[in-house]
């Protein structure tokens, strides 16, 4: 393992205002854990910055020491990119500042926030931006990688709502990136992941979100093909206010699940409608007529409740990742693919509690885009044409 010694290290300990954790420190083993329990990596040093200046100090130190750098926000990267053997891990989870401006409908958020924290702050003003469906996912990693969520059909992906970012670059400079400043860098940040610098602040566009209607619709697995066909056909023409997820799951032993279905293979649809209950009923009527559920838990709820609908399905410490692919091409999900999904459904057994096959109805423009076609902001980059997508378009892959 890389051992850090010498005057540069002493200087870091003097200049750095946050917390530094080394192998051998009591907190080291807990600090190197990430969401995926299969990841067991040993960074040379874990730095928890108190702010942007600390991030720049740590990046310059890593450069001098020829240390690789990994960045940790919420720690949800399934591949464990937040930690690397022998690297300097920049753990930004303590950087949780939030500033909401209801007048301009914007939020300036720290990279250590997770979605449930940002949602709570924005919902205090009846506002929200597209965020992940698991409350403990980091806002920075999700946004920089594109970012799917219940709101994406109505409001675009998380990266579509990123208006600006403060970034520490590999040479330790602090830059503001937006469509006006360092626009190339800004373009790359919206979908390019953590490859272009350490983001120390994110500015989001917010949308009014007050009335939400949603919840689980459950079906026995023998109806999987019929239900997924209804999902495909009705989802294709659904209004942008309706987000619809489908999953093949093993029903948990939860109070809301009828006893005879617990531990059984079931098909679940989760509609989330952004609007009043009566409008939601109209939007959902064709689906309910085509595939009447045995369990209907849909009801009016707050946005924060909707954001918690699938919480707990993928708890931290799991040793694997379930299939979770955006399904922009759900309209093209053919009978063969449906039959394959049906056959590969999960069964009861150890670790079989979570979603194993999950389909998502992708966003508004995304659903209507032809492969290779770009969203307006993606077209701003001069070097970019169809097929050169590193921005939000990276998420527009077709499934099925
Ligand atoms: C249970 C679960 C649910 C999920 N749900 C969704 C979902 O609903 N929608 C969706 O789109 N994705 C979802 N994902 C995928 C998730 O968005 C990505 O794994 C994302 O990278 C996680 O971000 P993080 O900050 O939590 O992860 P981390 O592991 O902390 O970071 C992952 C990588 O992102 C980059 N990064 C993070 N923060 C910064 C920063 N401040 N500056 C520069 N680079 C940074 C770095 O490369 C870092 O290694 C989910 C993942 C899990 C495990």
Image (cartoon, rainbow, N blue to C red):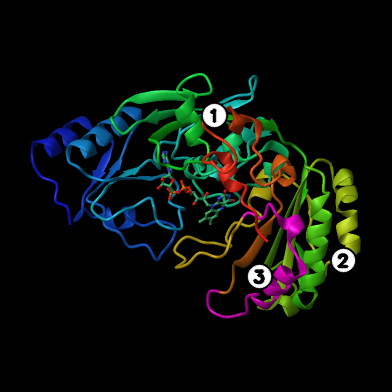
> Is tag 3's residue or tag 1's residue first in the polypeptide sequence?
3
Local secondary structure at mark 2: loop
> Is tag 3's residue or tag 2's residue first in the polypeptide sequence?
3
Q: Quadrant of residue 250?
A: bottom right
- In the rendered structure, does residue 340 fall within the stretch colored magenta? yes
The residue identified by callout 1 is 381
Of the 4 image quadrants, the one containing the N terminus is bottom left
For the point 46% across and 43% down, which residue is it? Answer: 193
Q: Residues within 10 Å of mark 1 (few under 14, many from 20)?
A: few
**Residue 133 x %, y %:** 61, 50
Q: How crowded is mark 3: few (under 14 residues within 10 Å), some or many (20 or more)?
A: many
The residue identified by callout 2 is 292
Q: Quadrant of residue 155?
A: top right
Q: Front-most of 126 and 293?
A: 293
**Which numbered disc, 2 or 1, marks the residue closer to the eye?**
1
Is residue 270 in view? Answer: no
Real-space Cα distance between discs 3 and 2?
18 Å
**Magenta residue span:** 326-351
Q: Is mark 1 within 8 Å of ligand 1?
A: no
Is residue 232 in view? Answer: yes
Kindly identify which numbered label has been placed on residue 249: 3
**Residue 300 x %, y %:** 79, 48
In contact (CB < 8 Å): disc 3 and disc 2: no
Count of marks, rendered view: 3
Of the 4 image quadrants, the one containing the C terminus is bottom right
Describe residue 72's horizontal placement relative to residue 142 as left or right.
left
Describe residue 148's horizontal placement relative to residue 164 as left or right.
right
**Residue 147 x %, y %:** 57, 44
Q: How crowded is mark 2: few (under 14 residues within 10 Å), some or many (20 or more)?
A: some
């Amino acid at each position: 393992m890389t051992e850090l010694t010498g005057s540069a290290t002493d200087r870091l300990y003097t200049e750095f205002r946050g917390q530094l954790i080394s192998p051998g420190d009591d907190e080291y083993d807990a600090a190197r854990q990430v969401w995926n329990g299969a990841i067991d990596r040993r960074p040379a040093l874990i730095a928890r910055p108190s702010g942007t200046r600390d991030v720049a100090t740590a990046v310059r130190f890593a450069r001098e020491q020829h240390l690789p750098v990994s960045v940790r926000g919420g720690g949800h990267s399934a591949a464990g990119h937040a930690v690397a053997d022998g690297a300097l891990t920049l753990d930004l989870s303590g950087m949780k500042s939030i500033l909401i401006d209801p007048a301009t409908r914007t939020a300036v958020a720290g990279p250590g926030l997770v979605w449930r924290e940002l949602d709570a702050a924005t919902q205090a003003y009846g506002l929200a931006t597209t965020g992940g469906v698991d409350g403990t996912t980091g806002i920075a990693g999700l946004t920089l990688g594109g970012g799917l969520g219940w709101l994406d059909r109505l409001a675009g992906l998380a990266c579509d709502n990123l208006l600006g970012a403060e970034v520490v670059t590999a040479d330790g400079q602090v830059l503001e990136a937006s469509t006006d400043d360092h626009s190339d860098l800004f373009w790359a940040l919206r979908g390019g992941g953590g490859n272009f610098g350490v983001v120390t602040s994110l500015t989001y566009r917010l949308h009014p979100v007050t009335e939400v209607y949603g919840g689980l619709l459950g079906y026995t697995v023998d109806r999987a093909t019929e239900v997924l066909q209804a999902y495909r056909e009705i989802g294709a023409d659904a209004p942008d206010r309706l987000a619809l997820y489908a999953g093949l799951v093993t029903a948990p032993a939860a109070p809301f699940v009828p006893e005879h279905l617990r531990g059984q293979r079931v098909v679940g649809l989760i509609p989330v409608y952004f609007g009043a209950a009566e409008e939601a009923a109209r939007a959902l009527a064709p689906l309910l007529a085509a595939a009447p559920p045995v369990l209907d838990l849909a009801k009016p709820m707050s946005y924060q409740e909707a954001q918690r609908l699938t919480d707990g399905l993928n708890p931290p410490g799991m040793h694997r990742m379930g299939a979770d692919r955006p399904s922009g091409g759900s309209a093209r999900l053919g009978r063969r693919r449906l039959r394959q999904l049906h056959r590969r459904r999960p069964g009861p057994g150890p670790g079989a509690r979570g979603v194993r096959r999950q389909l998502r109805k992708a966003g508004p423009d995304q659903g209507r885009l032809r492969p290779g076609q770009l969203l307006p902001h993606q077209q701003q980059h001069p070097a970019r044409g169809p097929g050169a997508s590193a921005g939000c378009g990276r998420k527009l892959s077709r499934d099925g």
